[in-house]
Image: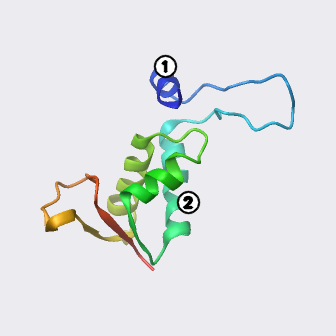
Amino acid sequence: MKRAMWNAAPEGDFEYSDLTGSRQLKLFLSTKEEEYSNDLAEHLFQAYRGCTISKETLLRDEVSWHLTCVQRHLTRALKILEYESSPSRITYIKLANNKKRRKGTYPSGSMITFLP
């Protein structure tokens, strides 16, 4: 459902409303995708700085638990941390079986090391 909403409104100008209670969390927040990815990148760095973590763990822990996060937001956030931060906040990407990685990709089985 989250992916469908981002496809329907790629600018992030959508909002879920449940009129049953004003204190209930909103499922979709009104935000642009790039802003969301930047916020997610900062969250990832603060949560995992100095750690090495698998992409699958990030998918399980971050994409599953953040209300509006889809896998492309995680990929974009990792690119922000690796290529747009100075210095790079991702220090090393190791692939399973020591395969060679294509720039800007984070394949399944990759281990991501964050700057301390």
Depth check, front residue: 67 or 116: 67
The amino acid type found where label 1 is placed reads Ala
Position in image of residue 101 (x %, y %): 17, 59
Q: Are marks 1 and 2 in contact (CB under 8 Å)?
A: no
Position in image of residue 30 (x %, y %): 64, 32
* Residue at 47 percent of width and 29 percent of height: 3
Residue bearing mark 1:
8
Please identify the residue farthest to the top as the structure is shown: 8
The amino acid type found where label 2 is placed reads His
Residue bearing mark 2:
43
Position in image of residue 11 (x %, y %): 50, 28
Number of disc labels? 2
Depth check, front residue: 13 or 78: 78
Q: Quadrant of residue 85?
A: bottom left
Q: Give the quadrant of the C terminus.
A: bottom left
Q: How is the image coloured?
A: rainbow
Q: Residues within 10 Å of mark 2 (few under 14, many from 20)?
A: some
Question: Does 70 appear above or below 83?
Answer: above
In the rendered structure, find residue 16 and report the number of the disc placed on it. Answer: none
Question: Does 19 appear above or below 45?
Answer: above
Position in image of residue 46 (x %, y %): 55, 68
* Residue at 56 percent of width and 60 percent of height: 43
Q: Residues within 10 Å of mark 1 (few under 14, many from 20)?
A: few
SS under mark 1: helix
* Residue at 47 percent of width and 39 percent of height: 70
SS under mark 2: helix
